[in-house]
Image (cartoon, helix red, strand yellow):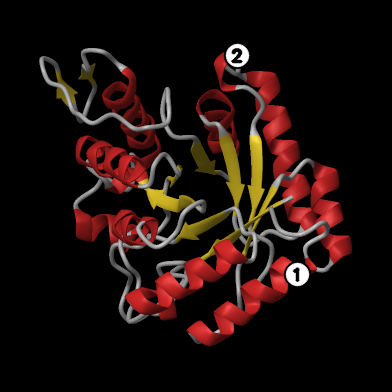
Amino acid sequence: MKLGLYGINVGPCAQPEAAARVARAAEAAGFESVWTAEHVVLPDPQAPPSPIPAATPLLDPAVALAFLAAHTQRLRLATGIIILPQRNPVVLAKELASLDVLSGGRLIAGFGVGYLKAEFDAIGAPFARRAERMEECLDVLLALWTQPHPQHDGPSFRFAGIDAHPRPVQQPHPPIVLGATTPPAFRRTVRRADGWYGFAMDVDTTSRCLAGLEQAARRVERPAGLGALELTVTPPPGLPDADTIRRYEDLGVTRLVLLPLVRSADELVDFVGRAGAAAPGGAS
């Protein structure tokens, strides 16, 4: 089981010294990856379904991970997740390719469709068409990362006769992980993603989502070039015990991205040390 750490750009880790210290501690403890959150803006005052208060410090994922790339050697750097329909994918393709180059090919590109209408409204992105826009944004990213002469003709983005370098170090592109909890999103994951990510899911909820992915796989064809779908889950907050980790493994989950319940960098460093020591066989 690979271990990741969630929230490397949030709260105490929004401070550069703390983020670098925690990332180095995670690498030393044997963690495989660190994962970011994303909200460009948040409703103020907080109201459901907003997950955190608007005053919570939250760094941009690509900027935070580029900073941490310079402070680590081996950690994979994951956007977990970027709300893709809110972004200009042409600009994002450049940002993420740059991050992959600067990190020596350590990017995991995680995306989700988003759910906060107030955030979409503030950005000027169409909330009602976010699923359609998600598909087009993925097309744009892949065109700019993989096509010898990138071109795209869609409802929101059109280009030809252009190019963008450098390309990502990882070929054909960094692994794409999609957060998905609905039948259409499961089908998109099967058709388009290298991996699936479930956030704050206990074993039973994970099992139901994996059943949804299996049902989706019976309805849509998965390109042979994608290989097996890698399964990543953030369990409920805290440090899962060995039995719980085994139950996730039995479901086919190969990466747990842990969500600490802490308030300081000191507590985070302690958490990653305990997690690495407690992992069956050691963190990997």
Q: Position of residue 149 (x, y in %)?
A: 21, 13
Q: Is residue 271 visible?
A: yes
Front residue of 265 and 152? 265
Marks 2 and 1, Cα distance to the nearest angstrom? 38 Å
Q: Disc 2 on helix, strand or loop?
A: helix
At label 1, counting other C-alpha atoms closer than 10 Å, the crowd grade (few under 14, some 14-19, many 20 or more) is some
Q: Residue at x 67, y 26 (%)?
A: 228
Identify which amino acid the numbered label 1 is placed on: Ala
Toward which corner of the image does residue 115 lie, by quadrant? bottom left
Q: Which residue is mark 2?
A: 224
Residue lying furthest right in this view? 243
Q: Is residue 47 visible?
A: no
Identify which amino acid the numbered label 2 is placed on: Ala
Q: Disc 1 on helix, strand or loop?
A: helix
Q: Residue at x 38, y 55 (%)?
A: 69
Front residue of 129 and 213? 213
Q: Which residue is mark 1?
A: 277
Q: Residue at x 70, y 37 (%)?
A: 212
In this rendering, the answer to whether 242 lies above or below 178 is below
Q: Position of residue 181 (x, y in %)?
A: 59, 46
Q: Position of residue 47 (x, y in %)?
A: 42, 76
Q: Residue at x 64, y 66 (%)?
A: 29
In the displayed structure image, the side of residue 154 where residue 249 appears, left or right: right
Asked if the residue at tag 1 contacts the one at tag 2, i.e. Cβ–Cβ closer than 8 Å, the answer is no
Front residue of 117 and 253? 253
Q: Earlier in the sequence, mark 2 or mark 1?
A: 2
Tell me the mark number nearer the camera, choosing from 2 and 1: 1
Q: Position of residue 254 (x, y in %)?
A: 71, 45
